[in-house]
């Protein structure tokens, strides 16, 4: 799984997961570490691409059978995926909807926190809302999860 050299202990370290736990073992030589890693590391399955080129839809195995996942690009260019579809058709349909929403501009990926988003909403509403309503909206927004973000 992972073989690297620990400079502090001057040993080679092999890390792997076993029964839900992270495991590690140290070796004096790299060859010993690599040999041990080959024994404990399971063969990594390559994602199976759908027969006709995939189209951003891939299969993976679960204990309940084959599931499908889809991959598409967000508006900021990052790849994202959604998993758990029981059929290829369902995954393709969901991918088409997601890609279309991104292309239309309905979905915009952002790293803003909710507090930053709420401050932008309040700023956008300020010219059209009455002063009393503005205070109420700001107070209700600030009383929840984004306390202190609205002024």
Image (cartoon, rainbow, N blue to C red):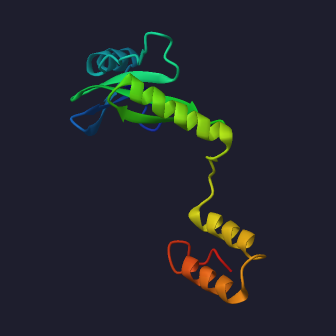
Q: Nearer the viewer, residue 13 or 135?
A: 135
Please state the horizontal and vertical placement of residue 13, each as a whole percent of the image.
38, 29
Q: Give the mark count.
A: 0
Q: Is residue 74 visible?
A: no
| Left or right of 68, for residue 122 | right
Q: Is residue 45 visible?
A: yes
| Left or right of 58, for residue 111 | right
The residue located at (63%, 39%) in the rendering is: 102
Q: Nearer the viewer, residue 3 or 105?
A: 105
Tell me the quarter of the image containing the C terminus. bottom right
Q: Residue at the right extreme?
A: 127
The residue located at (38%, 27%) in the rendering is: 68
Tell me the quarter of the image containing the N terminus. top left
Please state the horizontal and vertical placement of residue 9, each as a whole percent of the image.
41, 36
The residue located at (60%, 85%) in the rendering is: 136
Q: Nearer the viewer, residue 108 or 128?
A: 128
**Relative to 121, residue 34 above or below:** above
Q: Quadrant of residue 59?
A: top left
Q: Quadrant of residue 49?
A: top left
Q: Nearer the viewer, residue 29 or 130?
A: 130
| Left or right of 24, for residue 103 | right
The residue located at (61%, 78%) in the rendering is: 148
């Amino acid at each position: 799984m992972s073989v690297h050299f620990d400079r502090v202990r001057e040993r080679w370290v092999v890390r792997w997961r076993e029964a839900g736990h992270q495991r590690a073992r140290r070796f004096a030589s790299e060859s010993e570490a690599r040999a041990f890693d080959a024994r404990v590391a399971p063969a990594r399955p390559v994602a199976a691409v759908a027969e006709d080129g995939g189209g951003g839809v891939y299969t993976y195995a679960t204990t309940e059978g084959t599931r499908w996942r889809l991959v598409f690009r967000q508006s900021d260019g990052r790849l994202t995926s959604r998993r758990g579809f029981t059929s290829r058709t369902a995954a393709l349909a969901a991918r088409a909807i997601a890609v279309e929403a991104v292309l239309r501009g309905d979905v915009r990926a952002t790293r803003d926190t909710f507090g930053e988003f709420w401050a932008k909403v309040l700023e956008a509403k300020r010219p059209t809302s009455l002063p009393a309503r503005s205070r109420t909206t700001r107070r209700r927004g600030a009383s929840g999860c984004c306390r202190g973000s609205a002024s």
